Image (tube, helix red, strand yellow):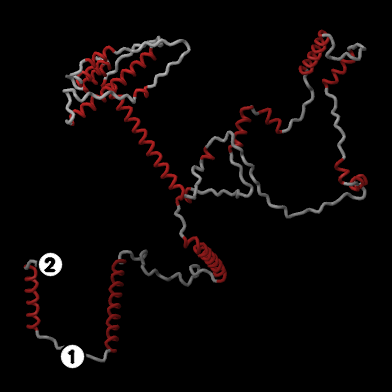
Amino acid sequence: MSSIAELVELLKEGSISKEQMLEKIYSASFPQKPESTKAIKSLEAPQFKFESGTDFEFNSNDFEDFHPKPTPLFEPSFSVLSPESFINRQLQWDLKKNINQEVLREKKLRIDVKDCTFKPKTNIPSCKFTKETIERLAKTRETTRLLKIKEDQERKRFEEEMKNCTFQPEINRNSSITGSKYLSDTPKKIVLYEQPAFTPKVKGPSKTMSSANEYLKQDPFERLSRPREPYQPEPEESEITENFFKSQIQYPENPGSSFSTRPFFERQALYEIMKQEKKELLQQITSAKPQINERSKKLVTTDFFERNDEMISKKSTPKQHPNEPNFQPKITNMGKMRRNRSVAEMSYGDLKKKNEKLEYLKELQEDKIREVVNPSVFQSKSYANVKSKLQIADDPDSYVERIKSQQRKKELETQIAKEEKIRQELSECTYAPIVIDAPVYVKQIARNMAMIKAELAANTKPKKPDWK
């Protein structure tokens, strides 16, 4: 006896059908009633004959209220008082109900498929393949659902955070500069000109200008609203030639005839004559030399591409605002290398430099005046016999000895000055102690003791401190 799980696997593999699986389950659950299996085997789909145009509806809900008859109490296989009999009867009833539903479903499918002529050949998918696909699809569906929930939560959190934010900055301001300007409107520059402060006094027409005075006496509205006389241009050369040819050719006297109603060959001959005359006029060498202005000369000499490049360069160069300063100082390399001025130099340093410069110029002016009044000392003859103090040119060998003697003399003078100062300080002191000089042997003992202490201090090792 195989279990239900094994039967389900065999059904998935395709080795048995649904009817065979149900038969095996039913035979295993009802060993005492083999007639039920025969009845199931003998079950066939009911053969109904329907007329054309009639619809057949199958309702599976009609069989849900199916209640099988309970087994009689006198059957020896079940005992009335035992609980196991009740459970077995319940299981049997469930199995019967499932079997009947499967049979009815199969019958319905057969009836539906009977009209279908196309029967495709389909392979039986393996259990492993279906399991993997189901797991994969379920996993992807779960991940998409979780991602959607996460995105909704992030969006709600972001909206809650943005509710408190009232400031909305303009991001990426350079996009208007670096972006495409093909369809963008260029605003007109507002040129700020100063209002003219000077109002000139206009002198009117004189008394001798009678026509101007009469013109000004008229009402301005009538004078200005009067329409101008139509302009009549001078006839061109082509019109003159056309009129000439018109006079030569004799047109019919019919008033309805025009240039468009002439015969084709006459019009063609007229156009050929006009074309030939125009060609001869162009080929003639003109004796007159027209006066061409500078603008026309530039247009004649320069090429189209050169003019186009010049126009592009003019457009690319930025236009200077009329109120902007025109002065652009040139900074040298030395000026670039210099350090920046401090706050003190920028505040009162310039004033100090200016005052120093003025003082220097003032001194130079005074020196010039003094030189004019008092002649130079070096030009006088009274200092001609004065010798040099160092005498390097006269006696260079004794220079070092003279310096040493001057230094000794200076040291002696400083020593005398110090003694004199000490004497003056002591003269002010009122208390003068009497000091008795010690004998010679006492001094000798003190010197010996000092020497012994120095030797002991040199031999003894330094002691470690108490805290180590």
Q: Which residue is mark 2?
A: 467
| Residue found farthest to the top | 265
- Nearest the camera: 153 or 374? 153
The residues tagged by marks 2 and 1 sit, at their Cα atoms, a distance apart of 49 Å
Quadrant assignment, res 89: top left
Residue 287 place in picture, x, y as percent: 79, 23
Circle 2 packing at 10 Å, graded few (<14), some (14-19), many (20+), is few
- Nearest the camera: 413 or 11? 11
Residue 140 place in picture, x, y as percent: 34, 30
Q: In the picture shown, does residue 301 fall above or below 241?
A: below
Circle 1 packing at 10 Å, graded few (<14), some (14-19), many (20+), is few
Q: Which residue is mark 1?
A: 434
| Quadrant in which the N terminus is drawn | top left
Residue 214 place in picture, x, y as percent: 92, 46
Pointer 2 or 1: first along the chain: 1
At 44% from the left and 45% from the top, the residue drawn is 159
| Residue found farthest to the bottom | 430
Which kind of residue does numbered mark 1 sit on? Ile
The reply to whether dot 2 and dot 1 touch (C-beta < 8 Å) is no
